[in-house]
Amino acid sequence: MDDNYDTIEADVLIIGAGGAGMRAAISVNDAGLKPVIVTKSLLGKAHTVMAEGGVAAALGNVDPKDNWTVHYGDIIEEGVYISDWKMAEFLSKEAPDRVHELEKYGAIFDRTPDGKIMQRAFGAHTYRRLAHVGDRTGLEIIKTLEDQVLHRNIEFHDEMYIVDFIVKDGKIAGAIGIKMDTGKLFLFKAKSTVISTGGSGRIFKVTSNSWESTGDGIGIAYRAGAILRDMEMFQFHPTGMVYPPGVKGLLVTEGVRGEGGILLNSKGERFMLRYSPQKKELDARDVVARANYREITEGRGTEHGGVYLDITHKGSEFIKQKLPAMYQQFKEFAGVDITKEKMEVAPTVHYMMGGIQVDAETERTNIPNLFAAGEVASGLHGANRLGGNSLADILVFGKRAGDAAAILARSSKLIDVSDDDIANVKATIDSFFKETGKNPYDLIDRLTTTMSENAGIVRDGERLKKALEDIEEIKKEFSEVGTKGGMRYNHGLLGCMELRNMLISCEALVSSALMREESRGAHTRSDFPKKNPEWKKNILTMKGEDDKMKFETRAIDEMPEEYKGYVKPEVYE
């Protein structure tokens, strides 16, 4: 490969250009410093667009009784009491300001009759809290932030795949990336770095996540020494498309249920009346997802292995106004008119609650100079995420990470990087070029299959051990993967690098799930069906000796007495 590389210097390097990354970049820029954004995909093409239903913020526009303390209580309860209480406080207090800020930036929200931002109901929220733009909220947010980035002339490099960090004396000095459309190598040097690369949803076979979500941020941070937390906690959204096969797993927004959609089995029964008589379709996501799963596995599913989601009773005009993207999605992909026909849906992998452990206030990781924000970071959501909190998360903590990274960069200097540091990363890339290497996508197919079959929505010790055995076997075979050709637009090379990172997320998830011998939130063990007070703690994953993963448990930080009054006491059966 070409030994030449370009060097780009920044005050703050931001890896990932979703909502968290772009909001962080705005903070750095507005502090008078130079941010540089790199993204694996294209600017404006982030997974943020998949958060369709709305952004959770206690504005109180529709339900005046709503306030930050109620939102705080909902976060802690939905996270099944293992969330970072400080992060929950920051989000519930600051989300309204971030929504109003978006409005000032030009975001256009749906309106109440008296002109305020409209808010809709969502699962497990006490009040109608989700500010929305039809069912295209994530798209509106990403386009609004992109507009701000472009108008500030913030430097960005798209189709840039970050291979690894450069670590000097235990500190992050920068990162090495490949510009995929040219094959050119880049060294990014920065005084501080924000990682905002999203989740690892593509480690499963059926997922709402787009192609980028292969856990790259988790992989590069873990290899550099970052501590991971709660990696067993993966959210299965209750409603993904099931037909046709090409769109299996594609998200059907919770906004459909928020606007009055009901779930039916093949017998026409509204089965949520059995599972959750009070909250019904708007119970917590883990509750609804497990109900859907059970109806399907017990033989009351649809022709294509789902259940029905029906909103036809709301009328054509209402549906087209409130859910334009869903109307178009089903019309184009499934030939289904949701104003007249039921949707077929089933649980789909959706969101990673675990991730890199961060300080609540600054989003600082345990590695000097490295911050993390958005889905790649852990702490806020605990064992399960409230719908709409993902968009609030990227805005609140994207800003906080950008602010903190800027403060650090202002008092820091760039760290020298040697030729040997660059050569080490180049050697990793070179190792993937082989004449007779194994196809990485064959191994990725085996990996995602075992994850879906053995570490999915309902788990048990036997199947988790099988998944771990399969992961170990694939890890051994990984040394044999390879690709031909050069660096430019080489999908085989991309597959090798993605598989390298996916294996880290998979091993951390399965090992942590095997350790947690209880059912809590999104983590359901059929062999340990009850919640256990001894497991009211977090599982930490870190790199041990000989590069082997090691795991520790950590008691959660107790919230102040005053805050306990905002939360219903935890109940054990």
Image (cartoon, rainbow, N blue to C red):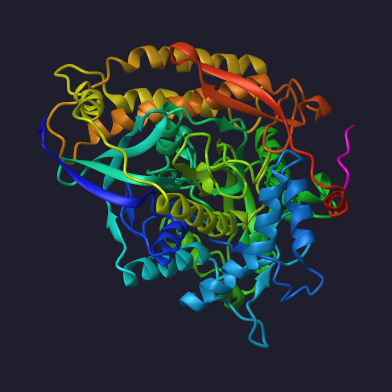
Image location (x, y in percent) of residue 269:
76, 50
Where the N terminus falls, by quadrant? Answer: top left
Asked if one can make out residue 275 in the rendered structure from this viewpoint, the answer is: yes
Rendering quarter of residue 315: bottom right
| Residue 480 lies within the magenta run | no
Residue at (32%, 28%) from the top-left corner?
A: 441
Question: Is residue 334 shown to the viewer in this render?
Answer: no
Q: Is residue 193 above or below residue 25?
A: above
Q: Answer whether residue 570 is magenta in the image.
A: yes
Residue at 49% x, 55% y: name it: 50
How many numbered discs? 0
Task: Please identify the quadrant where the C terminus is shown.
Answer: top right
Give how far across and how far down residue 340 sits, in percent.
Answer: 58, 67
The residue furthest bottom is 114
Q: Is residue 308 left or right of residue 184?
A: right
Asked where in the image residue 309 lies, by quadrant, the reply is: bottom right
Decide which of 58, 396 is in the foreground and name it: 396
Question: In the drawing, does residue 130 fall left or right of residue 287?
Answer: left
Range shown magenta = 568-573
| Residue 353 image offset from top left, x and y in percent | 60, 41
Query: Residue drawn at (36%, 28%), measured in percent from left and top?
Result: 499
Answer with left or right where residue 75 lies relative to residue 302. right
Residue 513: x and y in percent read 63, 24
Residue sitting at x 80%, y 55%: 279
Residue 232 lies, with reference to residue 291, above or below; the image says: above
The answer to whether residue 22 is above or below residue 493 is below
> In this orientation, which residue lies closer to the viewer: 292 or 98?
98
Foreground pick, 234 / 333: 234
Secondary structure mostly seen in magenta is: loop
